[in-house]
């Protein structure tokens, strides 16, 4: 179950979820502290732990952006309005926590949402 908003302390939240999945519904402070310290040592990012899946259309839009297509070209290729592509770009940047679509392309590859073509 994904949280509706980013919790204030993600490591504490993850620790409780991990302990719960192990069948420990009411962990002791010591159990929580141990799991939390293990999580902090691994450097888990919120975006990796709770990354929202991209829709097929968003992935298509991101792939075309990765190929260097302008938004107007993407709209023409996908046969949608330009404003739809603008909306998808905004959603992609928000979901991937990016400021630019180029950064979103990189993050899409990093999170496994985009698979670069096989160059063999």
Image (cartoon, rainbow, N blue to C red):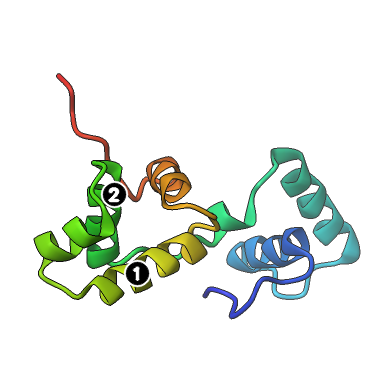
Q: Is residue 34 left or right of residue 76?
A: right
Q: Which mark is residue 65?
A: 2
Counting from the top left corner in percent of width and height, residue 101 is at 42, 52
Q: Quadrant of residue 66?
A: top left
Residue 23 place in picture, x, y as percent: 63, 68
* Whether residue 110 is situated above or below residue 65 in the rendered picture: above
In the image, which disc is placed on residue 37?
none
> Around disc 2, counting alpha carbons within 10 Å, would you say few (fewer than 14), some (14 to 19), or many (20 or more)?
some
Residue 6 position by quadrant: bottom right
Rendered residue at 72%/62% (across/down): 10
Q: Tell me where residue 73 sits by quadrant.
A: bottom left
| Secondary structure found at label 1 | helix
- The residue that disc 1 covers is 86
Residue depicted at 54% across the width and 62% down the height: 50
Provide the secondary structure element on which disc 2 rests: helix
Q: Nearer the viewer, residue 9 or 22?
A: 9
Q: Residues within 10 Å of mark 1 (few under 14, many from 20)?
A: some
Relative to residue 38, is residue 76 drawn left or right? left
- Quadrant (top left/top right/bottom left/bottom right) for the C terminus: top left
Label 2 and label 1: CA atoms lie apart by 12 Å
């Amino acid at each position: 179950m994904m949280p509706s908003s980013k919790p204030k302390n993600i490591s504490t939240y993850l620790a409780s979820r991990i302990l719960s999945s192990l069948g420990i519904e009411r962990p002791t402070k010591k159990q929580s502290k141990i799991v939390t310290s293990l999580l902090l040592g691994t450097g888990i990012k919120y975006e990796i732990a709770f990354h929202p899946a991209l829709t097929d259309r968003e992935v298509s839009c991101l792939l075309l952006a990765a190929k260097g297509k302008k938004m107007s070209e993407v709209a023409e290729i996908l046969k949608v309005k330009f404003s739809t592509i603008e909306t998808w770009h905004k959603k992609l940047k928000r979901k991937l926590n990016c400021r630019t679509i180029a950064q979103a392309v990189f993050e899409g590859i990093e999170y496994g949402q985009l698979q670069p073509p096989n160059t063999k």
